[in-house]
Amino acid sequence: MIDSPDVIVFDVNGTLSDMGPLAGAFIESGAPGHLATQWFATVLRDGFAVTAAGGSAPFAQIAQDNLSRLLTEHGVPSVADGTGRIMEALRNLGVHPDVPSGVEALAGAAQLVTLSNGSAQVAQTLLETGGLLRHFTRLLSVEDAPGWKPARSAYAYAAVECGVAPSRMLLVAVHPWDIHGAHAAGLRTAWLNRSGAAYPGYFTSPDIEIPDLPALARQLATPRP
């Protein structure tokens, strides 16, 4: 149980967006569907590396360059067409089934914002398509911060933009690395564990664990004893 926050900060990729359809875009391009997971992992790896070295690069650039390399390595007949198809699919993902009802329930509990390693435009398209944009006061991207999450500077940027102390913010994410980074930056954390997986022991544990977003709304609405 945690106190109600002033701001609920949502990760976007995988937390709000359902990335499952990307596998189909890989298959349509002539590549194995499982490459979608590998691709996303390499994008994060390289984005984290650039930030760790003191630099910054847009998510889209890292994603496209890694995608072209992967498709070439797997002998895709038209790398350019495949890259375009998959990047378009990434920009037009839908939300997870639990997101609409969860966001609707949370909208009155706190200010809702997003903080993504991707662009704010992708988040806007996702939320507009899902009919949820009206519930969010800010769509934040690390493209305007010193570095990618999970660097402390990314969460500090969000706190400044929202005008609140980090301790009054609750980060919601499916990624344990995001939970770990937010905790180190002073935010409270909610791990969205849709799969029922075990939380990695080498990361700081979340303040709460939830199976879906409506469960978070119920927890925040429950009075503390």
Image: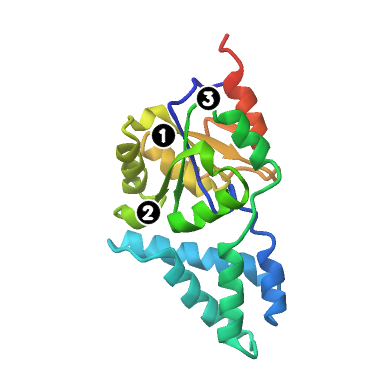
Quote the CA–CA distance across marks 1 and 3. 17 Å
143 up-or-down from 15: above or below: below
51 or 222, which is in the foreground?
A: 222
225 up-or-down from 193: above or below: above
Q: Quadrant of residue 159?
A: top left
Which residue carries the number 1 mark?
187
- Mark 1: few/some/many CA within 10 Å (<14, 14-19, 20+): many
Quote the CA–CA distance across marks 1 and 2. 17 Å
- N-terminal of the pair, mark 1 or mark 2, is 2
Q: Is residue 147 left or right of residue 97?
A: left
Confirm whether residue 205 shows in the render.
Answer: no
Q: The residue tagged with tag 2: helix, strand or loop?
A: helix
For badge 3, the amino acid type reads: Ala
The residue at 60%/72% (across/down) is 86
For badge 2, the amino acid type reads: Val
Q: The residue tagged with tag 1: helix, strand or loop?
A: loop
Residue 12: x and y in percent read 53, 50
The residue at 64%/58% (across/down) is 19
Q: The residue tagged with tag 3: helix, strand or loop?
A: loop
The residue at 53%/46% (across/down) is 176
- N-terminal of the pair, mark 1 or mark 3, is 3
Which residue carries the number 2 mark?
142
Q: Is residue 127 left or right of residue 169?
A: right
Which circle marks residue 174 in the picture?
A: none
Which residue carries the number 3 mark?
109
